[in-house]
Amino acid sequence: MYSIIRAKKHKSLAAVARSARHTFREQPTPNADSTRSNQNRIVGAKSCHELIQAMDERLPAKRRRDAVVCIEYLITASPESFERHGGPLDDLGAGYFRDALAWVRSRHGSDNVLCAAVHLDESTPHMAVYVIPLTSDLRLSARDFLGGPKVMTEMQDSFHAACGMPRGFLRGVKGSKAKHNDIASFYRALADAGEAPRLCRIDYIAKAAGYETEAWQKADGMLRANAKEVAVESIRKKAQLARAKVIEQHEQELRASSSRLQHEIAALDQRARSVSRREMEIVRRQPELEITQAKVEALERLLNQQRSLVKESSRGLSKKAVRDKELTLGITH
């Protein structure tokens, strides 16, 4: 059971509008159950027009032509996660999506989160969040939030810690290249396999008018019956293969690290043996060192006595007195 978050960049208001019409169900949505669309939850902008208007007011007047004007987050979890919890986790006041929305607001600032829509009319509940990528110093920079593998990994780690881990969800495999198949590709795959009829323009027009053609009903029925067996299973297999490749890569890295550690341990063992031999040599020669030390101390005492005689001689002692002193001390020449 995995917590899932994906991010998509939009570089124009037109691109945002195309996505928003699907989010607000302002166009035919074949993979959604129209009888359950009233269960969807929306916070912020309530229509495509409101979202575009809010973006236009919030975006800097001067920006690059190729600048990312919006980040769209898709937040969900694997189907098993919702089944385990016995419901769709749809409560924005106390559930998974509530925590996810709080995480997005903390990451981007509440003023930059323009809309969050929880869809409960599709097979797996999910939330779409539209965000303007403004930094704290009011720069329009998607790179600060999605720039590079390191930033994306940190984002996934942070989201999982805040929303997934408290519910016992797993984090996706780091470095996985598994891709998300969009709805259009999903339907094309079914049609290419002969599992569903191709929908034409008249089918979409009829659906927009509130009438479902026979082809539409057949396609919708086949989708519900075969989705897990055909497309979902295929997607899972691809994801598993991608995870297996990443795990294999991690195993190779661990084997390389283990080999390096073994070499280092062998080197340390050799040094330890060398030190041990040196210690044994010192212990073996200890008596010799003690005798040598005794001789040194005796010579130092004689030298000090010689110095004392020299000093006394310099003070005017007779040669005979010095000689007597030497005989007394037992010093011979």
Image (cartoon, helix red, strand yellow):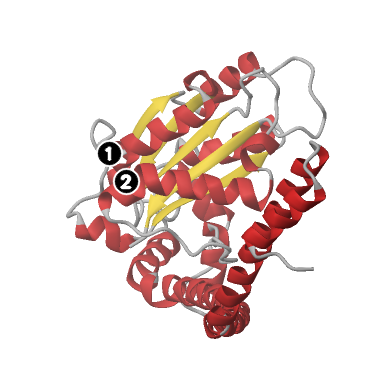
Q: Amino acid at mark 1?
A: Gln
| Whole-number angstrom distance, CA of label 2 to CA of label 1 | 6 Å
Q: x, y (%) of residue 75?
A: 43, 46
Q: Is 273 situated above or below 160?
A: below
Image point 75% across, 56% down: which residue? 323
Image point 44% across, 64% down: which residue? 215
The reply, left or right, for residue 237 in relation to residue 321 is: left
The reply, left or right, for residue 73 in relation to residue 327 is: left
Please tell me in which quadrant of the rendered image residue 266 appears.
bottom right
Image point 28% across, 45% down: which residue? 36
Cβ–Cβ below 8 Å for labels 2 and 1?
A: yes
Asked whether 126 or 200 is in front, the reply is 126
Q: Badge 1: few (under 14), some or many (20 or more) residues near its Cα, within 10 Å?
A: few
Asked whether 325 or 161 is in front, the reply is 325
For the C terminus, the image quarter is bottom right
Asked whether 165 or 260 is in front, the reply is 260
Q: x, y (%) of residue 21?
A: 53, 37
Specify the label residue 120 is tagged with: 2
Q: Is 259 situated above or below 15?
A: below
Q: Which residue is mark 1?
A: 39
Q: Is 172 situated above or below 113?
A: below
| Residue 52 seen in the figure | yes
The reply, left or right, for residue 166 in relation to residue 195 is: left
Q: Amino acid at mark 2?
A: Leu
Image point 82% across, 30% down: which residue? 65
